[in-house]
Image: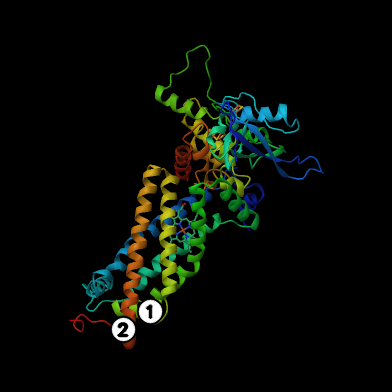
Amino acid sequence: MQKNHLIELLTQKDNRKKKSKIPARLDFLQSATGAVLVLFIMFHLLFESSILLGKDAMYALTKAFELDFVFKGGEPLFIAFLAFGVFVVFILHALLAMRKFPSSYREYSAYRLHSQMIQHEDTSLWFIQITTGFMMFFLGSIHLYTMMTQPDKIGPFASADRIYSDTMWPMYLLLLVSVVLHASVGLYRLIIKWGWGERQKSKWMIKAATIFYLGIGLVSLGAYMKIGYEHRGEYGKRYTVEANR
Amino acid sequence: MHRVYEDGGREIVLTIFRHNPNDEDSIPHFQDYPIIERPGMTLYIALTQIYTSMDHDVSFDFVCRAGICGSCAMVVNGKPRLACRTLTSEFSEGKITLLPLPTFQHIKDLSVDTGTFMNAMTKRVEGWIVNNSPQDISTIEKPIDPELSDEIFELDRCIECGICLASCATKVMRPNFVGAVGLNRVARFSLDPHDSRSDEEFYELIGDDEGIFGCMSFMGCQDHCPKHLPLQKQIAYMRNKMVKVC
Ligand code: HEM
Ligand code: SF4
Ligand code: FES
């Protein structure tokens, strides 16, 4: 054990009697990883709802992510790389944000009772943030693991089969609701926390965005369900543009 | 249900939390006090009336009864507020429940000790001007830009009532959190050109999870501060500064 570390253990300061700078970095990183995830999810949900423009549109977009304009036929490995990158940020964010969870029944009940007493919107919003955050430990991991290990199974039929025939839709439904609510509350909190914008206006805009993203998310999940249902007899068969003509 | 009297007074009920933590036999409970509301009645007037004509044992604190001293903060129907600045007519149901401020040492009934915390907080954030450069008192002090001094005086309007702490879910969960009152104090001195402390020095005072990084942006402070101080802005200002230190 280094002597300097022992000094910090005993005095909470370093050998120059200075406070650790780590808490500042952790706070910054918690926000930075949250912001990256919010940006990511905003685009992700838009891309994923390309199914609403038709199977061809979704297929073309999938292939574009597989860089089919460089590699003929596309290379799904790029999606796996992307998913891995998101997974790293996701784990880092969860690790950092975990510090803020209520860490005992005393803390939890103090928060709940206070929140019920004071009936204050921004205080109540945190409950959404910690419950959805907790749910995503599991839901987000399932989804990202699937994308890393089966990046080739993305497409109008493959995704619909996964959602309908593999009964992944309850997981996706919960994940959709959690991620949209969590990202919305999180983005609002970022704006207040760092003083990026006017509070009421931001809240209003974020509420509108929440409804929009929940809307397109739910409708496209419905669209995948419908395709999956119609395609259940040919489970596993892949989509091709020609066959759909 | 509420009788209205000829002179316009309606009957209201104050439900008061009663407990004396220093008396082993005292059981925490709520007690109802029906009184007749008078025009312009504040909770200060109502409580004084209860004390003088109904129950000489209820404890509560008032000094200035004008929103200046900060001693009368209590929880009024769930919201931490200054009792002397709260009109009973705001509550159309005529039912008002009063609790002592959470997060502070409870003395008795509605009375809490905010002083011990505020004193410790001041020492903890070194809430005073620090300037070690030699001062020549025979010359006129350097002038401050009037806009900046307005901004500083604005933050000086804090009356240390403790409402920001009692409204803060972080403080309720983590009692060592310094709270908006402390962070606002640091922001005040960090703005002041008379104070020579650098951001690094302020970091030593609030750069941890019980200081600036403990705030989870619940905004209870901002939304309940009776002096309407720009607490969100000050906390964000200090947070940006403290993150840049490293
Ligand atoms: C396992 C997954 C996740 C967990 C456990 C988690 C947990 C949390 C918790 C507990 C907070 C509150 C921190 C605080 O009050 O200071 C938080 C904040 C936040 N989360 Fe998450 N989260 C997860 C995933 C995500 C995802 C996928 C996104 C974006 C789509 C996201 C975006 C944010 C943002 C922007 C914040 C605000 C950051 C801040 O205040 O510094 N989180 N997260
Ligand atoms: S900042 Fe506002 S709420 Fe907090 S102690 Fe000062 S006056 Fe009271
Ligand atoms: S009695 Fe002084 S603020 Fe209410």
Residue under label 1: A164
Of B197 and A233, nearer the camera is: A233
Which residue is at a point 42% across and 69% down the rendered structure image? A173
Residue under label 2: A231
Left or right relative to A194: residue A111: right
Which residue is at a point 24% across and 69% down the rendered structure image? A53
Q: Do tag 2 and tag 1 residues touch (Cβ < 8 Å)?
A: yes
Please tell me whether residue A216 is drawn above or below residue B28 in the rendered image: below
Q: Position of residue B197 (x, y in %)?
A: 51, 32
- What subunit carries mark 1? A
Q: Position of residue A57 (x, y in %)?
A: 23, 71
Of A166 and B177, nearer the camera is: A166
Which residue is at a point 54% across and 33% down the rendered structure image? B89
Number of marks:
2
Regarding residue B79, the answer to whether it shows in the image is: yes
Q: Residues within 10 Å of mark 1 (few under 14, many from 20)?
A: many
Please tell me whether residue A57 is drawn above or below residue A241 in the rendered image: above
Quadrant location, ligand no. 3: top right
Left or right relative to B21: residue B48: left
The C terminus of chain A sits in image quarter: bottom left
The mark nearer the N terminus, 2 or 1, is 1
How far is the residue under mark 2 from the one under mark 1?
Answer: 9 Å
Secondary structure type for disc 1: helix
The N terminus of chain A sits in image quarter: bottom right
On whether ligand 1 comes within 8 Å of the CB at mark 2, the answer is: no
Left or right relative to B196: residue B70: right
Q: Would you identify the image quadrant in which residue A50 lies?
A: bottom left
Q: Which mark is residue B139?
A: none
Secondary structure type for disc 2: loop
Q: Position of residue A223 (x, y in %)?
A: 31, 73
Regarding residue B178, the answer to whether it shows in the image is: no
- What subunit carries mark 2? A
